[in-house]
Amino acid sequence: MKKLFAMTLCLMMGVSLFGCKEETDDPSVNKTYRIPKNGVCVVGTDIDAEDITEFYYTVDAPLAVSFYQRYRFYTEDGKHLFFHETREGGSWPMDESYTTKSGTVELSEQDWNAFFEILKNGTVRAREEDLSTGGSGPWLYLYWKGDQGKYQEFTFADYGSRLSFEAFCETLADR
């Protein structure tokens, strides 16, 4: 009995350490997500476009002229959406009264695919609290079906991808 209990416990720990099951709308299908041994997931390899549930890009600069920018991509009721908010001027911390531009745009499948292509080859790792760095961001978080509530801190593949992302968001915000 003790051996059976120990084996069951090891099996449960192994599943929690190396992957999880994500239920889909079809109860006969389960998708297994695995976190690589190095703790880094690559968008496009380990994370597919349909796995992404939310993506946040936030800049909060408490300088002489305060500036706040948030971009959010998310899926709701089967629709892909983009939310943007810009706050400028005034003092820090900035509240909603400093909002100069905001809105929500429904994305086409082409828009969502373009968003995914920009994120592709970017990496996601476990979130870490680091109060020593300070700075204004951007802070990037990718929520996906296999993140297990832990693997969400995003880094673009390169600086050019970040610039492409910012330009893409500005285009969407102007719609």
Image: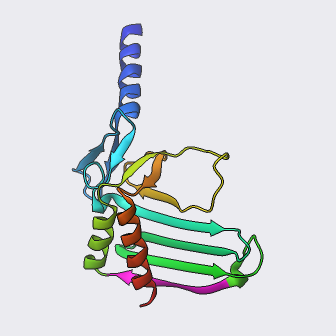
**Rendered residue at 70%/83% (across/down):** 98
What is the quadrant of residue 163 in the picture?
bottom left
The front one of 20 and 139 is 139
Furthest-top residue in this view: 2
Q: Nearer the viewer, residue 126 or 163?
A: 163
How many numbered discs, if any? 0
Residue 102 painted magenta: yes
Q: Is residue 135 left or right of residue 42?
A: right
Question: Residue at the spot x=43%, y=70% of the render?
Answer: 73
Q: Is residue 124 visible?
A: yes
* Displayed quadrant of residue 68: bottom right
Main SS of residues in magenta: strand
| Segment tinted magenta in the rendering | 99-107
Q: What residue sits 30% from the left and 78% below the top?
A: 111
User: Where residue 174 appears, x then y in whole percent?
Assistant: 44, 89
Q: Identify the image quadrant of residue 9.
A: top left
State the quadrant of the N terminus: top left
Up the image or down, 150 lies above or below 92; here it is above
Q: Percent from the top left, x then y, of residue 38?
A: 37, 34
In x, y percent, where is residue 77?
39, 73
Residue at 49% x, 72% y is: 71
Instruction: Say above or below: 13 vs 148.
Output: above
